[in-house]
C-alpha cells in the first residue's frame, strides 16, 4: 500500500450511521453496549482493520465485516477482537485468589473426593487461568489426592490464540513473584531473552476455547465448582448481564462459587446465590 493510500485510510472518520450499525451488531450478538462516547475508540481501533484489509472507507469496511462473506473470511472476528477489552495480569485482584486458596479449596477437599473443575470465563491472554494453575499445583504438594481441570474461554479468538502459546514478557511478568516465575516459566527458546513461556505442566492443565457469553451454545459442557467471570460483565447492558449471570450460575454445582470483579455486584440478578464476600457468591442448594 503506497503512502497516498495509507494517508487516505488514516484520514477516515467513522460517521454516526456506521457507528450505530456496529453498536447494534455488538449488542445483538455479544450483549455488549458501546456507549456513544466510544465512537472515538472504535474509530481508532478499526483504522487498523481498514489498513489490514486494504479497504479505504468505513462504510465499505463495515458492509464487508458484517456480511456473510466477512464472517466466513474471519474479518468479523477480527473486528470483534479489536472492539473487546482484554486487560489482565497475573494475580489480579489477589484477595480473590486468597479466598480461593483459604476457603474454597479446603472446603472442596473436606467435602468431596472428585475432580475440582473451574472455569475462567473471559480469560483474555491467559494470565488468570495460569494464576489458577499455579495455585492448584502448589496446593497439590500438600494435598496429594487433589486433582483439577481448568477451562478458559474468551470471545476473542486472537487473545485465545495468544493464551494457548502462554508467552509473556515486559509488564506481564514484571509483578510476578520471582519464585513462581522460576518454577513455572521458562526462557523462550530461540526468541527474545526478555520473553518467557509458561511451563508445559501449567499449559497442559488448561483447555482454551472461544466462547461468546451471550450465546449459551458456546459454553463448556461441564458443570463447575467455581466460575471466575471478572471485569467482563461491566461491558454488558443490563438485560444481557442478567441473562449471562443466570447462565453462569446454571453451570455451577450446588455449593459452588461465582467470582466477579471487585467493582461488580450480581446478587440482584438471582435468588440462587448468596454473597460471601464482596464480589464472591455461593450457589444455594
Image (cartoon, helix red, strand yellow):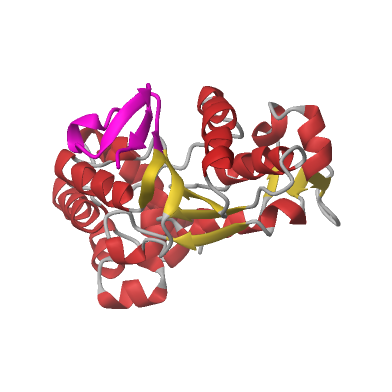
Q: Is residue 106 left or right of residue 173?
A: left
> Which of the 4 image quarters holds residue 201?
bottom right
For this rendering, which residue is in front, 200 or 99? Answer: 99
For this rendering, which residue is in front, 29 or 114? Answer: 114
Residue 145, x across and y down, in percent: 70, 49
Q: Is residue 101 left or right of residue 266?
A: right
**Vertical position of residue 66 compared to residue 91: above or below:** below
Quarter of the image with the C terminus is: top left
User: Measuring 52% from the left and 27% from the top, which residue is drawn there?
Assistant: 99
Whether residue 247 is visible here, answered yes or no, is yes
Residue 38, x across and y down, in percent: 27, 37
For this rendering, which residue is in front, 120 or 276? Answer: 276
Q: Is residue 236 left or right of residue 230?
A: left
Magenta stretch holds residue 249? no
The span picked out in magenta is 258-285
Residue 142, x across and y down, in percent: 75, 37
**Vertical position of residue 276 compared to residue 114: above or below:** above
**Total of numbered circles in the picture?**
0
User: Measuring 30% from the left and 38% from the top, which residue is drawn there?
Assistant: 284
Whether residue 55 is visible here, answered yes or no, is no
**Vertical position of residue 186 compared to residue 279: above or below:** below
Magenta stretch holds residue 282? yes
Residue 248, x across and y down, in percent: 32, 49
> Which of the 4 image quarters holds residue 57?
bottom left
Amino acid at each position: 500500500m503506497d503512502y497516498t493510500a495509507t494517508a487516505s485510510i488514516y484520514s477516515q472518520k467513522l460517521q454516526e450511521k456506521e457507528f450505530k450499525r456496529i453498536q447494534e451488531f455488538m449488542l445483538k450478538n455479544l450483549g455488549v453496549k458501546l456507549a456513544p462516547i466510544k465512537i472515538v475508540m472504535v474509530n481508532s481501533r478499526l483504522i487498523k482493520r481498514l489498513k489490514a484489509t486494504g479497504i479505504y472507507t468505513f462504510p465499505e469496511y463495515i458492509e464487508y465485516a458484517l456480511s456473510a462473506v466477512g464472517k466466513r473470511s474471519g474479518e468479523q472476528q477480527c473486528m470483534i477482537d479489536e472492539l473487546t477489552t482484554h486487560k489482565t495480569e497475573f494475580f489480579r485482584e489477589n484477595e480473590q485468589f486468597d479466598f480461593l486458596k483459604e476457603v474454597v479449596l479446603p472446603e472442596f477437599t473436606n467435602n468431596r473426593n472428585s475432580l475440582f473443575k473451574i472455569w475462567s470465563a473471559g480469560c483474555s491472554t491467559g494470565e488468570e487461568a495460569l494464576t489458577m494453575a499455579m495455585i492448584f499445583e502448589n496446593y497439590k504438594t500438600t494435598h496429594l489426592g487433589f486433582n483439577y481441570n481448568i477451562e478458559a474461554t474468551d470471545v476473542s479468538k486472537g487473545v485465545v490464540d495468544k493464551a494457548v502459546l502462554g508467552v509473556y514478557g515486559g509488564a506481564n511478568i514484571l509483578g510476578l513473584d520471582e519464585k513462581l516465575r522460576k518454577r513455572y516459566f521458562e526462557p523462550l527458546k530461540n526468541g527474545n531473552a526478555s520473553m518467557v513461556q509458561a511451563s508445559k505442566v501449567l499449559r497442559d492443565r488448561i483447555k482454551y476455547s472461544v466462547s461468546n457469553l451471550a450465546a449459551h451454545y458456546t459454553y463448556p459442557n461441564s458443570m463447575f465448582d467455581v466460575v471466575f467471570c471478572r471485569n467482563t460483565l461491566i461491558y454488558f447492558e443490563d438485560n444481557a448481564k442478567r441473562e449471562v449471570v443466570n447462565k453462569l450460575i446454571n453451570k455451577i454445582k450446588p455449593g459452588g462459587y461465582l467470582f466477579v470483579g471487585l467493582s461488580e455486584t450480581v446478587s440482584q440478578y438471582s435468588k440462587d446465590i448468596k454473597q460471601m464476600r464482596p464480589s464472591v457468591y455461593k450457589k444455594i442448594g
